């Protein structure tokens, strides 16, 4: 199929893009990389009357680092994020996750903000945003507001963005603990396909190998990706022995409400979630403890 007919306009600034959104209401879509929107339009799952192209807005393309935060513009290409060594040193989980996103061509065009605003519950970047407790800055003609990731994702392909709002930039917390490790993994039919289940974790330990800080989450097992801060808190002070990990990861999997399809039953997805959560927590811990 081909997309239904639509008007097209290229915005020169974020102010212009927000004004076009305000004028057109809910019948307009922003397009940046187009890696999710274009296929949906081709299958006529969405039929916007107008596309507002924000590719030429340089103010939405940046990576800015300080000791505690990495700020990334919403239109920054995924390949640019993955290639930035200074960013990877501060927010390593982003690079780990991007290795699982689609294919090289997808990452060359796809944007960081586009993936987050699309809000696929099995997508990698929304899961990282949940696990790291990223904050998302949203702009409209009336100003800006900032939401934590936990309030931004509402349901499948649904966010807290209003029809007249645009995602402007994302604030990623930088963990300052010296002994920090992270891990990301997923199971899919083929690399680049939608994840059946995905998991990621970040751990910080002290010199004795005791957990000082932990965060982990699961995607693909419900309507939104989930982080488990209360369960992660129970890991603090432990050395992540097998009994501790088993209890925490099984409790996390129990919170999922996955559906079943021809690729995997609901029961298999829950089992897989516990397995992958254990795997990433163990890998993140081992990486952290292995640092001098």
Image (cartoon, grey):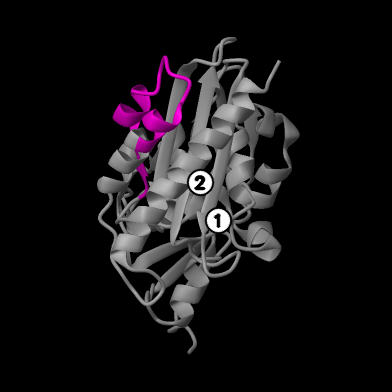
Nearer the observer, 61 or 285: 285
The circle on residue 14 is 2
Residue 228 lies within the magenta run: yes
* Residue occupying image coordinates x 51% and y 26%: 203
Mark 1 — residue?
54
**Contact flag, marks 2 and 1 (Cβ < 8 Å):** yes
- Image location of residue 34, percent across then percent down: 55, 65
Magenta extent? 225-246
- Image location of residue 221, percent across then percent down: 34, 56
Dot 2 or dot 1, earlier in sequence: 2
- Image location of residue 81, percent across then percent down: 66, 43
Number of marks in the image?
A: 2
As helix, strand or loop, the secondary structure at mark 1 comes to loop
- Image location of residue 161, percent across then percent down: 33, 49
Q: Is residue 10 left or right of residue 46?
A: right
Residue 244, quarter of the rendered image: top left
Give the spatial CA distance, label 2 vs label 1.
8 Å
> Which residue in the rendered view is the most extreme toward the bottom?
1
């Amino acid at each position: 199929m081909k997309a239904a007919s639509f008007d097209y306009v290229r915005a020169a600034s974020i102010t212009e893009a927000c004004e076009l959104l305000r004028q057109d209401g809910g019948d307009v879509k922003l397009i940046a990389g187009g890696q999710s929107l274009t296929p949906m339009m081709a299958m006529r799952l969405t039929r916007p009357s107008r596309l507002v192209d924000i590719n030429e807005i340089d103010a939405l393309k940046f990576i800015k680092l300080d000791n505690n935060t990495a700020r990334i513009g919403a239109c920054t290409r995924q390949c640019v994020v993955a290639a930035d060594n200074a960013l990877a040193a501060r927010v390593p989980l982003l690079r780990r996750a991007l290795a699982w996103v689609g294919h090289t061509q997808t990452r060359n065009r796809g944007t960081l903000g586009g993936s987050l605003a699309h809000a696929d519950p099995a997508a990698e970047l929304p899961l990282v945003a949940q696990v790291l407790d990223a904050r998302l800055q949203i702009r409209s003609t009336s100003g800006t507001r900032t939401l934590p990731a936990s309030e931004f994702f509402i349901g499948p392909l649904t966010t807290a963005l209003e029809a007249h709002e645009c995602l402007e930039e994302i604030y990623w917390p930088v963990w300052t603990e010296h002994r920090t490790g992270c891990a990301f993994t997923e199971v899919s039919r083929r690399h680049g396909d939608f994840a059946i289940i995905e998991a990621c974790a970040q751990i910080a330990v002290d010199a004795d190998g005791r957990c000082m800080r932990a965060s982990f989450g699961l995607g693909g097992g419900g309507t939104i990706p989930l982080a488990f801060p209360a369960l992660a808190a129970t890991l603090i002070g432990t050395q992540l022995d097998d009994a501790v990990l088993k209890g925490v990861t099984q409790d996390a999997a129990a919170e999922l409400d996955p559906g079943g399809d021809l690729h995997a039953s609901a029961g298999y997805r829950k089992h897989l979630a516990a397995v992958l959560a254990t795997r990433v927590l163990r890998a993140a811990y081992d990486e952290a403890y292995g640092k001098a």
